[in-house]
Amino acid sequence: MDDQGKQITILLVDDDPDDRLLARDAIAKHELKHNVQFLENGEELLDYLKRRGKYEDPKNSPTPGLILLDIRMPKMDGTEALKAIRNDQELRNIPVVMLSTSRAEEEIFKTYDLGANSFICKPVTFDGLVEIMGSLTDYWFETVQLPKGARNSDGQS
């Protein structure tokens, strides 16, 4: 938990149900006290962030302290969603970590150019995923100082 003892919401956005399940299991290994929510694509992410449709109630869509965003997804891919987040005055300060199976230099450069805070290649083993999830949460919630609004999980920023 953060220094005020509040839960922080983490959004993991990935279209692959197997990847979401593995991520859920990897996060559970760390016994995080934070609220982790799983979304399937960039459109759903923006609906959540803008509180549209089923995410209209702030109690069901608290402001995230961190977004873990897969790049390759249907409907709206991760780079399009990242661009929309960085172009929105209310959302632009939310940390976004891009996830990809690709190690292509142009893809890495593009995501940083669009404002990603980090780029992580998805590990190929479950143990690697567990290690990455632990490192991510330690870094983002124990090491760095997040903007005050990102620490408030009660639906208000």
Image (cartoon, helix red, strand yellow):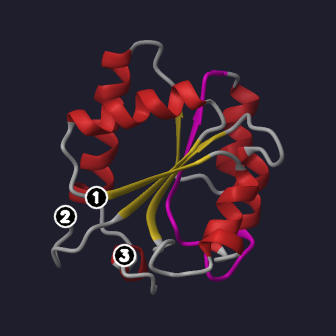
Which residue is the site of mark 1?
34
> In this rendering, is residue 133 above or below 117?
above
Task: Name the amino acid type tagged 3.
Answer: Ser
To which quarter of the image does residue 134 belong?
top left
To which quarter of the image does residue 84 belong?
bottom right
Q: Which mark is first along the chain, 1 or 3?
A: 1
Per the image, label 3 sits on a secondary structure element best described as loop
Task: Name the amino acid type tagged 1.
Answer: His
Q: Position of residue 113 (x, y in %)?
A: 71, 51
- The structure residue drawn at horizontal position 54% and vertical position 25%, both measured from the top left corner, is 18
| Distance between mark 2 and mark 3 Cα atoms | 11 Å
Per the image, label 1 sits on a secondary structure element best described as loop
Per the image, label 2 sits on a secondary structure element best described as loop
Asked if residue 74 lies left or right of residue 151, the reply is right
Q: Residue furthest right?
A: 75
Which residue is the site of mark 2?
1
Task: Name the amino acid type tagged 2.
Answer: Met
Is 137 in front, or is 27?
A: 27
- The structure residue drawn at horizontal position 34% and vertical position 43%, both measured from the top left corner, is 136
| Distance between mark 1 and mark 2 Cα atoms | 7 Å
- The structure residue drawn at horizontal position 70% and vertical position 65%, both measured from the top left corner, is 46
Is 51 in front, or is 70?
A: 51
- The structure residue drawn at horizontal position 71% and vertical position 76%, both measured from the top left corner, is 88
Q: Which mark is first along the chain, 3 or 2?
A: 2
Q: Can residue 128 be seen in the rendering of this structure? A: yes
- Magenta residue span: 86-103
Q: Can residue 121 be seen in the rendering of this structure? A: no
Q: Position of residue 99 (x, y in %)?
A: 57, 36
Label placed on residue 153: 3
Is 127 in front, or is 38?
A: 38
Given contact means CB atoms under 8 Å apart, are the residues at marks 1 and 2 in contact?
yes
